[in-house]
Amino acid sequence: MHKYFISSPHRHDGSSVRHLMLSVCFALIPGLLTYIWFFGWGIVIQCLLAVGFALAAEYLALRLRKRPVTFFLKDGSAVLTGLLFALSISPFSPWYISFFGILVAILFAKHIYGGLGQNLFNPAMVGYVFVLLCFPADMTNWPLTITQPPAISTYFTYIFTTPENLIDGISGATALDQMKTQLGSMGMVSEIKLEPAFGQYGGAGWEWIACAYLFGGLALTILGLIRWHIPVAVLLAIFLFSLFFHLYDSDIYPSPLFHIFSGGTILCAFFIATDPVSASTSAKGKILYGGLIGVLCFSIRTWGSYPDGIAFAILVANACVPLIDHYTRPRVLGEFK
Amino acid sequence: MSRELHTFPGGLQMPTYKALSDQEMSILQPIPERLFLPLQQHIGIASEPTVKIGDKVLKGQIIARANGYVSVPMHASTSGKIVDIGDYPVPHPSELKAPCIVIEADGEDRLFDIKPTHEYHSVDPKLLQELIKECGIIGLGGAGFPAHVKLNEGVENSVDTLIINGVECEPYITCDDRLIQEKANYIVAGTRMIRHAVQAKHCVIAVEDDMPAAYAELEKLIDDDIELLKIPTRYPAGGEKQLIQVLTGMEVPSGGLPIHVGVVIHNVATAAAVYRAVTRGEPVISRYVTVTGMVDKPRNLQVLLGTRVKDCIEACNFDVDENCQMILGGPMMGMHVSNPHVPVIKTTNCILVQENTPRPPEMPCIRCGYCADVCPVKLLPQQLYWHAKTDNMEASQQYHIFDCIECGCCSYVCPSNIPLVQYYRYSKSKIAAEERRRDGADHAHVRFLKRNSRLGKKLENKKQEQQVLGNTDSTENKQDYIAAALERTRLKREESKTQSRKPSTNDKDA
């Protein structure tokens, strides 16, 4: 590599991976603030933990792989992985959830494949699935919004100690979880939605956080940092599928808006599925990839054994990316078949 | 008649920096003491010198002749003496020296006896082509492809549209803009001549919409026979295939030429050169060069070919030092040169002097796909990069590496700062080298097969001869034959024994 611009072009627009990654992190801020508003400071502790572990794991991996440490630590990708992981788990999760999740995400999903740009699977989602499978009990305990947000001390108790008794009335299953279990025991959608965990469309409080994510995601799209194809395809696929089944039988299939505004749908559509490394690259490919995530996500939620299928949907779609890319190569100018 | 404009995919809007140099009239660069004229200024085969060291030459006299069809002659830029024919620095990315003819100017600038006006309307297109070749005209936009070849393609095929390209899409460069403003009549007349040469049905002159002064100048001169169009400013709208797409909506086939969609395309400077050649018999010996960037007085110069780049920069009140770098051409596709003594040649449209800013370090590709978004050919640059890195030449070709026009848009937007174009050049040259090697191997293989068949035939002939012998002669004769052969070998052996003894005795004596 030459130190100067020897080979044309002799100019650059000044963009960088760091700028890209940190912009995505900044776009998460509205969502994070809304999160704090509804559920208190627990999420901040989780973010700090996850980002801290992520940077430490990245440092370790870079040292072991004999790569320039500060150069790659500065790229912001580990920070983003940490943030996305923290936003995927419950703010009540004990510290070791972050620890193991991030360890798997950074060391196994990212660096074993060759580090930045080489990973086949989304690191944050691999980490999330790992802890979901290893610590299922810790993953179902989510804050509720019936009272005011839990105090920061409560979070500290939950995160850093193992409380003998769970404090009543502040934590429970998510809206998606309740929907799943109660539909399983012959409940009706309209009845289930009367539970306190439910809001207007999605989970109480969560639907507003989803709106804030949507705002950040739209900002990224308008700034041209992400393309519209993947978010639109994910949301449209979920919307259309849930609409079809909802119209077929609205007693056992919740409405499209419920699917979109609960769980991690919006976060996934704009921030996780759009991770460029593990996503498809061509316009057509992105639409197929996003559509696949949407369909898988809806299917896992409806017929699978997990209330929110985002992580699994993303990993399966990641695995399909080479195939999608192979079959969606755009027609080169002047290429006639 | 106004034409419906189309668009090309990708491309970039970027700062143009044209105002630096497009305001002032161009000035004549004085004749330097020595002119260095490389024999290879065009795509194709290098010209062959027709002069010797010590010869006196006049301005416009042929000093090197075309060497084959895809080649053009070269002319003396001024009158003087040939002082050397040898290797000197030339504008080439390798920075190697190449054969040049060096003229020591006598300062008199005496003109060679050149043929005067042709009435081009009555001239046979074939003759016009010959004249254009004789005057050393090549694509003056930057590629440097001999102009007569393109014209010939036009004569042999039916040409629907002739496009005269005044779309100077690269930032900084304004030499075509100034040329149009100052010599619009040359361009319009030259355009009509080229049109006559290729017998085109339609004829378009295209400029960018940020060149209003040039547009106005042309507008004054054209009639209904030529369409004058403004096209939106977007890099690389001036690329041959991109401009054809914008003006006609047609795509030049992958690996094909503009003529395959019935288009012949020439640069405005080429049109002006054709006018000069046809009406005055003047060859290409000077050109407009934009000198811009961090020089004190950015402007356009009319430079004699062979003038050193250093002289041009000094004419704009600037001295090159270590803190700046020189680029011949624009910032997107230009060539970096470190030696200020290289000469201006026919394709040198711009000398850009810019600060020597360190290049940000290269990061791994994160597959963001921004490169694919801006690619005007709709390639997948990230895949091409990957295949270049892994030396997978077959895959590179499947992903159409040879359709890459090296516009540099992909590298410009790459957040990982990967010098993508450099990777593609590597792939292209590696594939070309591989093909040459394969051609060589194929050639050797064919020769081997031929030799084998020749030897086989010989063997067969011998066999047949022997068979003939065997058939006619009896067994007795055969016995004699064998005995004779044995006798011959015995004699030979003895002979060799005596011979081998001799040197050994000699050795002992020594």
Image (tube, coloured by chain):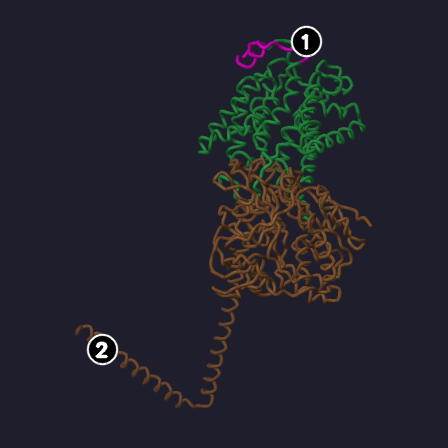
Chain colours: A green, B brown
Label 1 sits on residue? A147
Residue B419, picture quadrant: top right
Q: Residue furthest left?
A: B509
Callouts 2 and 1 close, C-beta under 8 Å: no
- Please check the rendered image and state whether residue B239 is part of the magenta-colored stretch, yes or no: no
Residue A43, picture quadrant: top right
Q: Which three-letter amino acid code belongs to the residue tagged 2? A: Lys
What segment is highlighted magenta in the picture? A144-165
Residue B430 in sight in this render: no
Pointer 1 indicates a residue of which chain? A
Pointer 2 indicates a residue of which chain? B
From the image, state whether disc 2 or disc 1 is nearer to you: 2
Residue at x 46%, y 28% (from the top left corner): A60
Label 2 sits on residue? B502
In the picture shown, does residue A116 fall above or below B252?
above
Where disc 1 sits, the SS reads loop
Measured in 3D between alpha carbons, the distance from the residue under mark 2 to the one under mark 1, in whole angstroms, is: 120 Å
Residue B473 in sight in this render: yes
Horizontally, is B110 left or right of B501 in the view? right
- Please check the rendered image and state whether residue A153 is part of the magenta-colored stretch, yes or no: yes
Where disc 2 sits, the SS reads helix
Horizontally, is B504 left or right of A136 in the view? left
Say if labels 2 and 1 share a chain. Answer: no
Asked whether B344 or B23 is in front, the reply is B23
Q: Quadrant of the C terminus of chain B?
A: bottom left
Q: Position of residue A257 (x, y in %)?
A: 75, 24
Residue at x 17%, y 74% (from the top left corner): B509
